[in-house]
Image (tube, rainbow, N blue to C red):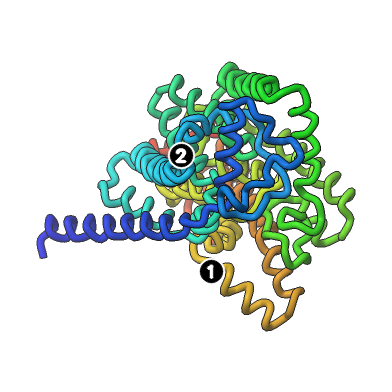
Amino acid sequence: MTSTTRQRLMLAASVIVLLLGIGASWAAGRGGVDFPSLYVIGRGVLTGTNIYAPGATADFPTVYGVDQPMGMFYPPATGFTMLPFAMLPYGVAKFLWFVVMDLVLVLGVRQLVRVAAPRAETRVWVFCAGVILLSSTLRWSMILLQGAPLVFGLLCLFIAAEHDERPRLATALAVLAVAVKMTLSLPFLGILLLRRRLLAVVAAGGTWVLLNVAGFARMGSGALREYRQNVGQLEAFGNINAPDPWNPISLPRLDWTSLIYGLTANLKVAHLASLGLSALLALGLLWLGFRAAKPKSLRSTALFLPPLVCLGSMCVYHHHYDACLFFAPALLAYFNLGEELRPKWALLLTAPLLLMILVLPIGVVQRLANDAFGVRGIGLLKLSFPIATNLMLAGSLALLLRHFAQANGESVGGTLPGNQRLNNGSKIDSSPPAASTVSVGKSGIE
C-alpha cells in the first residue's frame, strides 16, 4: 500500500468518525428538554414579556412537551444571544440550535488543531472533532441541548484567534461567550488577563452588564426581583440541582460546594470553603500570570488554560454536562506541549476526568452502582465527578508550576544547574535550549 493510499484511507476513516459523531449528537439531542427555557428567555427579550414572573412557565408541558421548570435561571443577557432563534418557530429554532452547536464545535476544533499543530494533516482535526462528538460529555449535554458544547467551540475559536493575531475577533468571541453563559466564561477572561488584554476583559464584562440592564428594563420593573427569587431556588434541596450527591434525584456536579457538602453535610461550610478555595486559586493564577515572561506565547496559554477551566468549573454550580470544556486544554496541551508534559504523575492525575468525559456510560454505571451498593453507590458515583475535577486541578497546577520553576532556573525533580547529573545518573546538557523548549528568563514561563 502506497503512502498516498494510506493517507486517503486514514482521512476516510476520520470522516466516518466525524459523521458518526454528528449522528450520535443528533440522536441524543432530539429530546432537548432544556432548550425551551433558552427559547423562552429569547422570546422574553424579543416581546418584553416578564418570563421570571410566577406562572410564566406553566404552559411548558402543553406548548413544548416538557415538564414545567422550577424556575427561569438564565439572565436576560443570554436572551439577547437567543434572539435569532426566538424569531423562528420553536421546532425550527430547536433544530437550528443543534446545527449551530455542532458547527461551532467542529470549526472550533479545526482552528485549535491548526494553531497548535500547523503541520497536522486534515484527518487529525476531523478525527478529533468526531471523537469529541462521540464522547460521553457531549451526549450528556446534547440530551438536554445545553449550551456547553457551543461555549466549548467558542473557546477553541477564541484561542485560535488570539494566537492568529486577530484580537478583535477574539474579543468578540469572548463577549459572546460571556453573554451566552457567564458561568462558563472564566477561561476566556483568564486568558485575556494573561495576555494583558484588560480592555477586552472590561468590554466582555461591561457588555454582559449592559445587556442585563436592558433586558430587565424591557421586561418590567419586577423582573429583576423575580429573577433573583428564581435563582434563590436554583440549588434548593429536593431537586436535580441540589448540591447533595447522596440525594437520588440530584445530578452529578463538578464544583467544590457539591464535593464539600457531600463530605460534611454542612451547606454553610461548603459555601465558605468553596469561596475561600476559589479566591485562593484565582489569586495564585493571577500572581503566576503577571510574572510570566512571555504571557502571549502558545505555551503559556497551554499551561494556564487547564487550571482556568478547573477554576471556572469548580467555583460555581456546574453539572457534569459542562465538563466538555476540558477538551480544549487537553487538545492544546497534547499538540503544543507533547513530550514537555512533565512530571508524568501529574498526567496520571488528569486521566480520571478525561476518561470519564470520554467514555463513561453514566446510566449503565449508575445502575451497576445501585445494584451493588444501593443509594450509597449512586452517591459515590456522583461524588467521583468533583473528586476527578480536583485531581485534574492538582495535575494541571503541577505541570504549570514545574514549567514556571524551570523558567526561573530552579531545581526541579533533581535537576541541577550546569553540566551535572539527575538522580538517575543521566547527564544534563548545559547547551542553550532548542526553540521547542522552555526558555530561561528572569521570571515566568515562555
The type of residue carrying mark 2 is Pro
Name the one closer to the observer, 398 or 107: 107
In this rendering, the label closer to the viewer, 2 or 1: 2
Instruction: Please identify the residue farthest to the left as the structure is shown.
Output: 2
Question: Taking 267 as reference, is 443 left or right?
Answer: left
Name the one closer to the observer, 197 or 219: 219
Please give the label number shown on residue 89. 2
Instruction: Please identify the residue farthest to the top as the structure is shown.
Output: 199
List x then y, in percent, for residue 379: 73, 68
List x then y, in percent, for residue 237: 81, 56
Which residue shows up at 68% across the image and 25% down it?
219
The type of residue carrying mark 1 is Pro
Name the one closer to the observer, 243 or 292: 243
Q: Is residue 356 above or below residue 339?
A: below
Which residue is under mark 1? 361
Which residue shows up at 12% across the image and 59% down it?
5
Question: Taking 441 as reference, is 223 left or right?
Answer: right
Label 1 crowd (10 A; few <14 / some 14-19 / many >=20)? some
Name the one closer to the observer, 157 or 428: 157
Which residue shows up at 44% across the image and 48% down it?
331
Q: Is residue 126 visible?
A: yes
Q: Is residue 105 visible?
A: no
List x then y, in percent, for residue 342: 53, 52
Which residue shows up at 64% across the image and 59% down it?
388
Counting the numbered discs, the total is: 2
